[in-house]
Amino acid sequence: MSFSVKGRSAIVTGAGSGINLCFAKLLLEHGCNVLIADLALRPEARVVVDQYAIPSSAPRAVFQKTDVTDWRQLEQMFEVAEREFGELDIVCPGAGIFEPHWTNFWRPPGTPESQDARHGGRYALLDINLTHPIRTTQLAISHFLRYGNNQRRKHIIHISSIAGQNPNPGAPIYVATKHGISGLVRSLAILDSQRGIRVTAVAPGVIKTPLWTEHPEKLKILDEKTDEWVTPEEVAQVMLALIQQDTVGATIGDQKAQGAQFPVSGGTILEVSKTVRPVEAFNDPGPGGRPGNTVSEGKVILDEVYGTRHPLTLTLTGVSPCSLSLTAGRCRRNGARGKRAPGHHGEATWISCVINLVNTIIGAGVLAMPLAISHMGIVLGVFVILWSGITAGFGLYLQSRCAQYLERGTASFFALSQLTYPNAAVVFDAAIAIKCFGVGVSYLIIIGDLMPGVVQGFVGGAPDYDFLVDRHFWVTAFMLIVIPLSYLRRLDSLKYTSIAALVSMAYLVVLVVYHFVKGDTTTDRGPVRVIHWAGPVPTLSSLPVIVFAFTCHQNMFSILNEIGNNSHFRTTGVVFASIGGAAATYILVAITGYLSFGNSVGGNIVSMYPPGLWATIGRAAIVMLVMFSYPLQCHPCRASVDAVLRWRPKSASASDNSPHRHPLLGSKGTRTPEPMSDLRFSVITTTILVLSYIVAMTVSSLEAVLAYVGSTGSTSISFILPGLFYYKISSPDSPHHQRLLKEDDEAEDGMISDDSNDDADEESIQARPLTESGILRRGTRQWRRSLLRKLSLALVIYGVVVMVVCLITNSLFIASH
């Protein structure tokens, strides 16, 4: 008979992410209480737990930190569930892993890559994938029988795999565990009729999880033109149907019983590819080539096993290269250093990222560089520019390091603050939103102020139509250009407008250098300071101009999310190229502009040139520059506003105390974080645009406001937040850092193992020198990490000092005016 999960209670292991999280979420949505048992919760799982954590409401979600290889913790999991919910009705021991290098048949215990103790007498893969489901099933049956309510059907649902039907020499232990799960489920089929305990399973095909998308060594066995993914949501739907329905259709999500229907009873195993079919105990045809079951280049795994890259002449009866499957498995990220998860999340090219970042950095502030140099002197001014570039670049570098602790494509200030300072996340994002909004409005004001002069310069006097010299008209007109650009979701989509903006900037640089070379401004040139400065007060007044000229950190995480190859080398290259290009531009404009006018130079170098066509084009170039820079401020402003609106306070008990970056059991996350819905995206973007327009139309100067916003917002996102985040998350006691450290060690071991002779005997392995074993290399890495932490803390202190100095300076100068 049919069974509704509403008002029932369940335990789901491995539900910190992946298939199991989707299943737990589906149960909650249908009114079922759920205890989520895992080593830790990913951000999307935390959202679910927080959403259903209110004690007085139903249904409820409770997180219980659980290592499923520890039987005492499994017992405690049931005790907590009983205490929270009372009688249980559904148990899903879904936590599992695919065959990673650290517990792998082809990398036996004692080899560098294996984490299984040589004399430990066990494989972690078996403990997680087979022993834990068996023990959890025992505990579940004991609980069900203790309550003894035969009128209330109970369910135990397992996650097998299509690997439980086919052999696979690339992952033999994993295959054995899934065959074992299928055998366990069929062996307990009799409990359905005798005790009202229905034990069933799903056998998913190739699931789209980061296990694939973040691992190019696995993606290479899949041809996306011919192979199809199965989503974790689809698997979760079939799992719910196994519990609630007496029959399940071949079409996933079919609620009207159309098409083929399969009866459900104890021992039922349903294969979940793009369609559903029952897996028979005898004479089953196997997964075959159904969509969602295939990986066309499966021979690559065999090549790796046999240490060859040429096609194998291997024929095994019943073996298909497309028989690999990934269920709720999580694996550690193995691979060479610098290539952690360069998956398929990003498509932006390296040059595209550099262009967008340089355009974010270089703005109208470049025109004030000559004045700043005049206050400081050439030597000190160039040093301050270089120093500001180095510190800003270090902040960008720390952001790229912090992104390693997050899933590919999910990096943001909000995501980092959730791992480090959860309850301060709203403050951080609010500061970023206000700062970006203020800068964006200032760009519109600049357009309104400059365009009347540009028109007069081109027509040679007052135009025939008065509205052409009305700032309100030009703000409105350029908003019509800015609006469609601001609705682009991806930063990479703005690369062509960034190129146009940089072309405008290039013209301004050429204009400044041209007049310097021509020497047509030397008549009224004042004295030039090379070493001497104008004094501390003028120098401090120009300090914010240089320091904040390198602010681009609000877009760095978007760059890291969108770049196609996010290796350490590539992302560091983006930082070096962007900061280096901006610093070179600033120094060139500063020196040539200052030498053109000496101490008589003004705050806008272009406005000092004699009226003429080229100077007018220069002013138009400024307008073009700031116009195309506005969407680059709208992008992070929108993301921060969305984060602020999504923020909910965290209780102390909800903090993540896991010793791992991600749950060891179950997948690291089967789907990327859900983007803003089209409606939410449109509402937030429209609100930002409307408010920007209103402020730009009603306010002619934001100098005082921007002075304070820049002093606090720019220093926060450029220096304080990157330093704080990295210092916190890279602490030796940080569970996220411990996880990353272990992955680095595994990656290092993998590189060493690749260079070793597979045929070497035990003695030769043990006799390797320390330099080959990687011990010295790891010691060097630890020293570098320690130094980086100290430097990150120094960056925080530097940012606070800069903030205080700039606030005091701004207050004094605003008061004096």
Image (tube, rainbow, N blue to C red):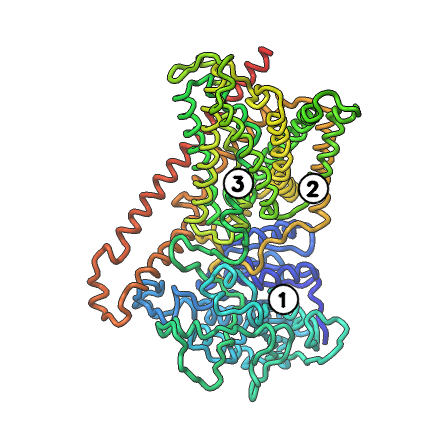
* Residue 493, percent from left and from top: 61, 48
The answer to whether the residue labelled 3 contacts the one labelled 1, judged by CB atoms less than 8 Å apart, is no
How many other residues sit within 10 Å of disc 3, few (<14), some (14-19) or many (≥20)?
A: many
Does dot 2 land on a helix, a strand or a loop? helix
Q: Is label 2 or label 1 in front?
A: 2
Mark 3 vs 2, N-terminal side: 3
Q: In this figure, which residue is indicated by the disc labeled 2?
A: 685
Amino acid type of the residue tagged 3 in the rendering: Leu
Q: Could you tell whether 517 is left or right of 24 in the image?
A: left
* Residue 416, percent from left and from top: 52, 44
How far apart are labels 3 and 1 at the CA level? 41 Å
Quadrant containing the N terminus in the rendered view = bottom right
Mark 2 vs 1, N-terminal side: 1
Task: Identify the residue at the far top of this view.
Answer: 816
Does dot 1 land on a helix, a strand or a loop? helix
Identify the residue at horizontal 62%, vertical 49% (top origin).
50
Identify the residue at horizontal 52%, vertical 69% (top origin).
222
Question: In front: 458, or 50?
Answer: 458
Q: Is label 3 or label 2 in front?
A: 3
Q: In this figure, which residue is indicated by the disc labeled 3?
A: 357
* Residue 411, percent from left and from top: 53, 47
How far apart are labels 3 and 2 at the CA level? 21 Å
Q: Is label 3 or label 1 in front?
A: 3
Mark 3 vs 1, N-terminal side: 1
Q: In this figure, which residue is indicated by the disc labeled 1?
A: 236
Identify the residue at horizontal 63%, vertical 64% (top origin).
233
How many other residues sit within 10 Å of disc 2, few (<14), some (14-19) or many (≥20)?
A: many
Identify the residue at horizontal 47%, vertical 25% (top origin).
517
How many other residues sit within 10 Å of disc 1, few (<14), some (14-19) or many (≥20)?
A: many
The answer to whether the residue labelled 2 contacts the one labelled 1, judged by CB atoms less than 8 Å apart, is no
